[in-house]
Image (spheres, helix red, strand yellow):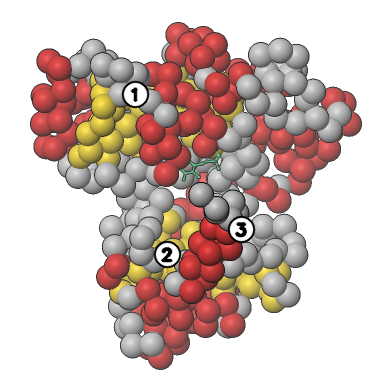
Amino acid sequence: MKRHPTAFLKEEYEELVKNDFDWKLRILETGSTPHSVVDGKEVIMLCSNNYLNLSNHPRLIQSAIDAAKKYGAGSGSVRAIAGTMDLHMEVEKRLAQFKRTESSLIYQTGFAANAGLIPQLVGKGDIIISDELNHGSIIDGVRLTKADRAVFKHRDMGELENALKDADKKYNRILVITDGVFSMDGDIAPMDKIVDIAKEYGAMTYVDDAHGEGVIGPDGRGIGAHFSIEGKIDVEMGTFSKAFGVVGGLIAGSQDLVNYAYNKSRTWLLSGSHPPAVAGAQLTAIDVLETEPEHVRTLWDNTKYFKKELESMGFDTGWSETPITPVIVGESKKAKDLSNRLYDEGVFALPIVFPMVARDKARIRTMMNAGLTKDDLNFALEKFEMLGKKLVII
Ligand SMILES: *Cc1c(COP(=O)(O)O)cnc(C)c1O
């Protein structure tokens, strides 16, 4: 057959552009700061995952510099061969103490943790039971296994229990997996109940708490701490790329889990370890969370204020329980329009539209930040109110 080997690249890209499904990159000309310069314009940043503003914390920056000076720019190898420095080990030890688990392991990213670990926990003859709204990196991790799959309705414990009952006799291992904080709606998985139900059926539990680490629970210690069930979730997975302000995937759990994971996860065994600057900043991020509780407190004060004000203006913020606050507007076009106009007014928040959320639930997803002042919030709120009225949303 005479075919053009790469014609699809252009065709499919053009199709995306035509349907307005392509990513139009916005370029930051500053750090990810509460006031950022995006495409030449100063804006209030409302869509960064840098919840605690730690990416700009002087101590994290200094630790990154110090580690680079001492150990160099790169680590030289994968962790398993010659890429484990004492600094990497120190971060893991410190992280386990912070998470109050026996042990911890750090991957290059959260995505790498899910893609590397999930396929090692289950295989043929096993089953994974997932919440229907789980994150794409969980879904990709699941795709790498030969295990069967079942899905339960979002946060529906009755459906979870039925799926477990069904699976109990037919399968060898059972893995129940869920996001901790759901990234589109900002609600929290009922992890205490999930752990109890799973235990009855001898199922493993795995939570992806990427948006919960550094945000929920006392001192931002994550979902285990939030429900006071530290050490009871078999796998607590999270990331340093969000509230911790750096980059890196983490798992916290038993020593058995960590021994197993680092001997089996292919993303960990076959991909270079973090540069020392990253490890240095990770270590200090944990230290800052332990010694400067004001960041988490301010994040929540800001969150409560912002949500309350939006709601009193008449906006629908869904069922968010966390600093992820969706402003639900309905059709995709309206959400995009609102986002563009907010940007023109100096507020940066992106629309989330179908297929990421239901067709009639298009929204602006705002993410709160501890570095925003009351004046910043009032400025953003005024713009939301003015445009909400103009676009007949409120
Ligand atoms: C962001 C995110 C990830 C990926 O984490 P990275 O460390 O940025 O790769 C995984 N799961 C969820 C739920 C996330 O929100």
Q: Which residue is mark 1?
A: 146
Q: Is mark 3 within 8 Å of ligand 1?
A: no
From the viewer's perspective, is the residue at label 2 or at label 3 nearer?
2
Q: Quadrant of residue 256?
A: top left
From the viewer's perspective, is the residue at label 1 or at label 2 nearer?
1
- In primary-sequence order, the first of circles 2 and 3 is 2
Element under disc 3:
loop
**What residue appears at the point 43 percent right and 37 percent down from the top-left corner?**
140
Q: Where's residue 229, x and y in %?
A: 33, 26
Element under disc 1:
loop
**What residue appears at the point 65 percent right and 26 percent down from the top-left corner?**
271
Q: Nearer the viewer, residue 130 or 86?
A: 130
Q: Where's residue 133, x and y in %?
A: 31, 47
From the viewer's perspective, is the residue at label 1 or at label 3 nearer?
1
Q: Nearer the viewer, residue 116 or 21?
A: 21
Question: 7 left or right of 62?
Answer: left
Q: Is mark 2 within 8 Å of ligand 1?
A: no
Q: Which residue is mark 3?
A: 371
In the rendered image, the vertical position of residue 254 relative to residue 76, given as above or below: above
Question: 265 left or right of 284?
Answer: left
Q: Residues within 10 Å of mark 2 (few under 14, many from 20)?
A: many
* Mark 3 residue type: Gly
**What residue appears at the point 71 percent right and 12 percent down from the top-left corner?**
81
Looking at the rendered image, the quarter that the C terminus falls into is bottom left
Q: Residues within 10 Å of mark 1 (few under 14, many from 20)?
A: some
In the rendered image, the vertical position of residue 300 relative to residue 366, given as above or below: above
Q: Residues within 10 Å of mark 3 (few under 14, many from 20)?
A: many
* Mark 2 residue type: Ile
Residue 357 seen by the camera:
yes
Q: Nearer the viewer, residue 15 or 90?
A: 15
